[in-house]
Image (cartoon, rainbow, N blue to C red):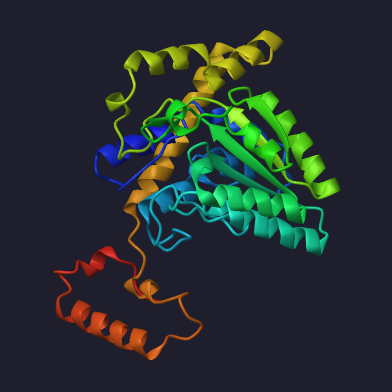
Amino acid sequence: MDSVLYEAQRQGRISFYMTSFGEEALIGSAAALDPKDHVFGQYREAGVLLQRGFTLEQFMNQCYSNELDQGKGRQMPVHYGSKELHFQTISSPLATQIPQASGAAYAMRREGNKQCVVCYFGEGAASEGDFHAGLNMAATLGCPVIFYCRNNGYAISTPSIEQYRGDGIASRGIGYGIDTIRVDGNDIWAIYEATKAARKLAVEQNKPVLIEAMTYRVSHHSTSDDSSAYRSKKEVEDWSKRDNPLARMRAWLMNKGWWEKSEDVEVTKAAKAAVLKAFADAEKLKKPAVSEMYTDVYDEMIPELVREKAEIDALLKKYPDYYQVNDYAKST
């Protein structure tokens, strides 16, 4: 999916994309959660959504901002969200989800429903003020929240060595009195076990936990980035060969006798076919109805919006070809 959508952006078919190359083992954290635990993601948590049941069609519809996009075309690609899967919609501004996660976890504690919140972010986001406010709030209020930091070595073009002088992010959790663990972020089972233990602490004792997963961002930061400008090609190749989460998982399964190379080829072929079909179907759909610009803002449209909508409707009726009205779904 990452490969197809990354290339689609390069071809001008979608506007933006971010891959998870090198950080695929993060899906182990999703497997350790209860389906009703709430997730506050950053933007490399597509694997968490996949594990929860978000379909390929839903991924593609969101990235295309078409008429079936649950966000009604209002978000950039990869800014997913799902009320049904308890996955809060992703925001572009860095680290806003961290204090939000603490607040949601505090509400869960008051409700006593034995659920927790998981908040994902990168080590670059840990340099934002929201990180410190969120952790301190969680620690002092006793919030059942797991802070999952993906330390992948880079905050866009800034390497971690230039981001901080301390020992990574784990030491900050200890400073706030939060139970903290640092794990191999490319080992799916290490992540699974750490998250499972963290959830037990959070739910049973109403305590926040910080997990620092040490990994490496193999891809560019996004399609708006060219990482060759600030790191060598050899560095990326060395990491890909030495510590690839997919290769490690594959080797482990083969050593157990649970996987064969022939199966690898078959599964990859089937997965690619499913991705390409969902991709092609999403591309054929129209954009959301223009009227969706005015929904969900107020319970009832205020006079100013009513006036604006009437003005837009008149322009669309007068100049349908100029505004390409046939590219948009009809208003319901």
Where in the figure is residue 83, as x and y percent of width and height? 60, 59
Instruction: Residue at the far top: name it.
Output: 255
Question: Is the C terminus in the top left, top right, bottom left or bottom right quadrant?
Answer: bottom left
Q: Quadrant of residue 323?
A: bottom left
Residue 200 in the image: above or below residue 293: above
Q: Which one is nearer the viewer's eye here, 120 or 22? A: 120
Residue 193, image quadrant? top right
Query: How many numbered marks appear?
Result: 0
Question: With 73 as the anchor, is 199 left or right in this view?
Answer: right
In the image, taking residue 48 as reference, residue 192 lies left or right, namely right
**Position in image of residue 199 (x %, y %):** 76, 41
Is residue 317 depicted above or below 186 in this figure?
A: below
Residue at image point 24% right, 67% down: 326
* Front position in the image: 285 or 251: 251
For residue 280, above or below residue 158: below
Residue 325: x and y in percent read 23, 69
| Residue 188 spot, x, y in % from top left | 64, 26
Residue in front for this viewpoint, 1 or 139 = 139
**Residue 158 vs residue 148: left or right?**
left
Q: Which residue of the protein is positioned furthest toward the bottom in this rendering?
A: 303
Image quadrant for the N terminus? top left
Asked whether residue 85 appears in the rendered view, the answer is no
Q: What residue do we see at 85% from left, 47% from top?
A: 205
Residue at image location 47% in from the left, 27% down from the top: 153
In this rendering, does residue 264 appear at all?
yes
